[in-house]
Amino acid sequence: MDAPAVLIIGAGGYLGGPIWKELLHQKSHFSRVAILADESKVDKFSEAKASGVEIIVGSFTDPASFKGFNTVLSLLGNHAMKYQPAIIDACIKAGVTDFYPSEYGSDISQGDYLTNRYFRDKHVTRQHLRSTVTLIPSFNYTLIMVGGFVEFALMPFFGTDTENKTFTFYGPSEKAEPLTAVADVARYVVESISLPKSPTQEREFRVPGGLYKWGDFIDEVEKVQGVKYTREFLPRQEALDKARECEGKGDVDGELLFSLKAIMGDPEAQGVPQPWDNAKFGFEPERLGKTLERIFAGRK
Ligand SMILES: NC(=O)c1ccc[n+]([C@@H]2O[C@H](COP(=O)([O-])OP(=O)(O)OC[C@H]3O[C@@H](n4cnc5c(N)ncnc54)[C@H](OP(=O)(O)O)[C@@H]3O)[C@@H](O)[C@H]2O)c1
C-alpha cells in the first residue's frame, strides 16, 4: 500500500496545530501532509507552511480540493460540522478512501449521548457515513473517542476558572469523566492512520488517557497550582433549564454549552465506556498530574 496522503480540513482551530505537528513528526509514514484552506484564510496557515505542510487552496465541498489525497481528517468546529455529509460526498468523488469525521470526544453511540443537542451534527455525520459505506466498498471511516481534552477541562467551558480559582459543575463531585491531553489526542489520531483497516469499513478507537472524578480532578489542579479552589456543585437540572432558555432565545452556542454541561453532570452518563483500545497504540498516554504540571509550567 502507498503511504497515505493526508489532507486536514478545519485545521485553524484548537485541534489543528497539534494534529499537523504530529503528522510532520511522523512524516516518514505519509506521502503528503496538507491543509485545505479557503482562499480568504490562507494566511492563518503560514506557520504550518513554513514547517513543511502543503497548503491546498479551495472549498471543502468541491471534489477538486481533495484530488490526490486518500485520507481526510475533519477537525471542523461546531458551526461547520453540518457541512460534513456534503464534504464526504465531495471526498468520494475525488477518490478519498479514508475519512475521519470531527469527533474526538465522547462515545455518542450510547445512552443520552444519542439525543443530547450538543452532538446532533456529529450524529447526522455518523448516519451519513454508515449509509455511504454500504454504497462504496472502497470507502472507510474512523471514529476517535478520547473523552474531554485536559486542556478544555481547565477552561470555564467545562467549569474551571484557573484565574479566579473557581470550579462550577452541574452534577455531583463523584461524577467521573474520561480525559486526554491534546498532544495524546493528536498521537492517537495520527498513529491510527497506519493501523489495519476494518472489513466493516468502520473503525472505532476508544482511547482516553484516564478516568477522573471531577472532585479528584480539582484536587490535582489545586496540588499543581498550589492554591485552593472554590467549588460549586449545582443541580444538573439548572444546566438543562439554561439550555432550554438559550434555545428559546436562538442562542445556539449557549444551548450547546449547557447541553454539554448537563450530560457531563449526569451520574448515569459514561463519556467513553470500557473496553478501551489504548493497547493497540505504541505509547502510554500522559498521566493527568504530568499534563497539568506541563500546562501550568508553560503559563509561567
Ligand atoms: N473532547 C473535547 O474536550 C474537545 C475539545 C475541543 C474540541 N473537540 C472536538 O474537536 C473538533 C475540533 O474542534 P475545535 O475546537 O478545534 O474547532 P473550532 O476551533 O471551533 O473550529 C475548527 C475549524 O472549523 C472551521 N470552521 C468553524 N466554523 C466554521 C464555519 N462557520 N464555516 C466554515 N468553517 C468553519 C474553521 O476552519 P479553518 O481553520 O479552515 O478556518 C475552524 O478553524 C470538534 O469535533 C470538537 O468537538 C473536543
Image (tube, grey):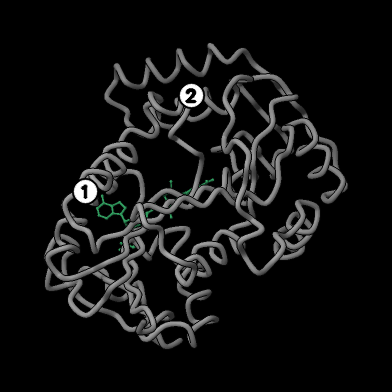
| Residue shown at 45% from the left, 86% from the top | 51
The picture places residue 115, in percent across and down from the top left corner, at 38, 23
Helix, strand or loop under label 2:
helix
Q: Residues within 10 Å of mark 1 (few under 14, many from 20)?
A: few
Q: Nearer the viewer, residue 263 or 57?
A: 263
Identity, as a three-letter code, of the amino acid under mark 2 = Gly
Identity, as a three-letter code, of the amino acid under mark 1 = Thr
Question: Cα distance, mark 1 to mark 2?
Answer: 25 Å
| Residue shown at 36% from the left, 50% from the top | 77
Q: How many marks?
A: 2
Q: Is residue 23 left or right of residue 299?
A: left
| Residue shown at 49% from the left, 68% from the top | 195
Q: Is residue 12 left or right of residue 238?
A: left
Tell me the quadrant of the picture where the N terminus can be found: bottom left
* Residue designated by label 1: 134
The picture places residue 155, in percent across and down from the top left corner, at 60, 43
Tell me the quadrant of the picture where the C terminus can be found: bottom right
